[in-house]
Image: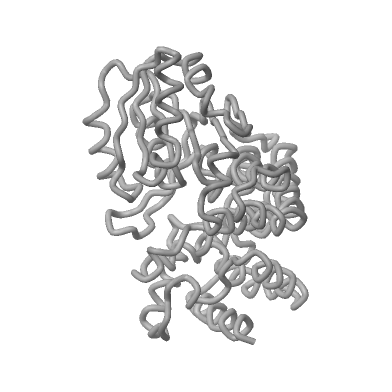
Amino acid sequence: MNGVHFVLGSPNAYIHEPGILHKAGEWIGKYGKSVFIITGEKSWNSCGNRLTDSLDQSGVHYEVHTYRGECSYEEVERLRALVPPAAELICGVGGGKVMDTAKALANAMGKPFVAVPTLAATCAAVANLSVMYTEEGVYLHFPVFDRGTLLCLVDTDIIAKAPVRYLAAGIADTLAKWIEAPMSATGKKHNLPTVGGLQTAKLCYDTLLQYSAQAIEDARQGIPSEALQHVIDANILFSGMVGGLGEDNCRSAAAHAIHNGLTVIPETHEAYHGEKVAYGILVQLVLENRPQDDLDEVLAFYKETGIPYRLDQIGINRALSDQELQEIARISLLPESTMGNMSFPVTSEMVVNAIKKVEELSRA
């Protein structure tokens, strides 16, 4: 075996420009004339009229349905019952959980998936997987699909006007690629797709360190600047390409595993995906026993960009019990999680101690 694996590096088509939704019907119409749209209430309010006007002008039929807030198998089945037989495309309009719900539905039905992200908070618009949760918001697993995004339309005007907190969360989620992918690739054959995934992860990291502060400042003013465009492309496209190229060789590791564990604490359900991943990055750095300079660099970046670095910044404004810490560790160590991609065995005790160490360091 030469070690080459399944590669789904990027969407079939990715178009990013300010105002692209005014031409959405033209683009979507190239692939189908009937589209089933899944969205969230806030997402739809941000761009729905712009999208439907364009679809009407291009003669594309559409139905719009609002999802109930969680990417769960129950929600996918509820929506599946609403899809008309004539629907040719499944389209997600919104943030990460909307994307993952629509993507899971599209793959369950064998229909192409179209993404219209209204936030740059995750790479869900292009990644060939969905992160699945229970109806209560507790992490289950992430099925990987053998079909990628057919079309991704990114309108910088829309994302520039979204709450800046989402952008910061996406920056943290993307930053994790360069922390996790090299760990996941350790001990595995570094074929060219794996090398490409690793280099893409480093490109994301370097791009974010250079442009994030300016992008966040511009987003606060609703300006679709060049810096913001670079960060959006890193968060949505290149972040998704890391796993698309490297697949299991460049998957998540401890940072996302800690995110998964944190979902068992109800207070964290109001924190965004990337915010919990941000905390997980710090835990992974401690688990790896990284030099203090590495931790200082990440902490300084978090403070500059408004990314959370303490438990009380992701909703946990109390001391966690030993039982709760053990439960976080248990979920993070499940086979369905990604702690197994670490290059060394991680125990429950190590996870609990690392969380305590992060709290000490971040408060200092």
Residue in view at x 65 percent, y 43 percent: 224
Q: Is residue 207 above or below residue 115?
A: below
User: 218 or 284: which is nearer to us?
Assistant: 218
Residue in view at x 47 percent, y 20 percent: 25
Q: Quadrant of the C terminus?
A: bottom right
Which picture quadrant has residue 295?
bottom right
Residue furthest out toward the front: 221
| Residue 291 image point, x, y percent | 76, 75
| Residue 150 image point, x, y percent | 51, 25
Is 20 displayed left or right of 312 in the figure?
right
User: 126 or 129: which is nearer to us?
Assistant: 126
Which picture quadrant has residue 325?
bottom left
User: 178 or 45: which is nearer to us?
Assistant: 45
| Residue 249 image point, x, y percent | 63, 47
User: 146 or 96: which is nearer to us?
Assistant: 96
Is 120 displayed left or right of 195 in the figure?
left
Is 211 displayed left or right of 126 in the figure?
right
Camera sees residue 7: no
Residue in view at x 47 percent, y 35 percent: 145
| Residue 70 image point, x, y percent | 33, 50
Camera sees residue 289: yes
Total count of labels: 0
Q: How is the image coloured?
A: one colour
Q: Quadrant of the N terminus?
A: top right
Residue in view at x 31 percent, y 47 percent: 72
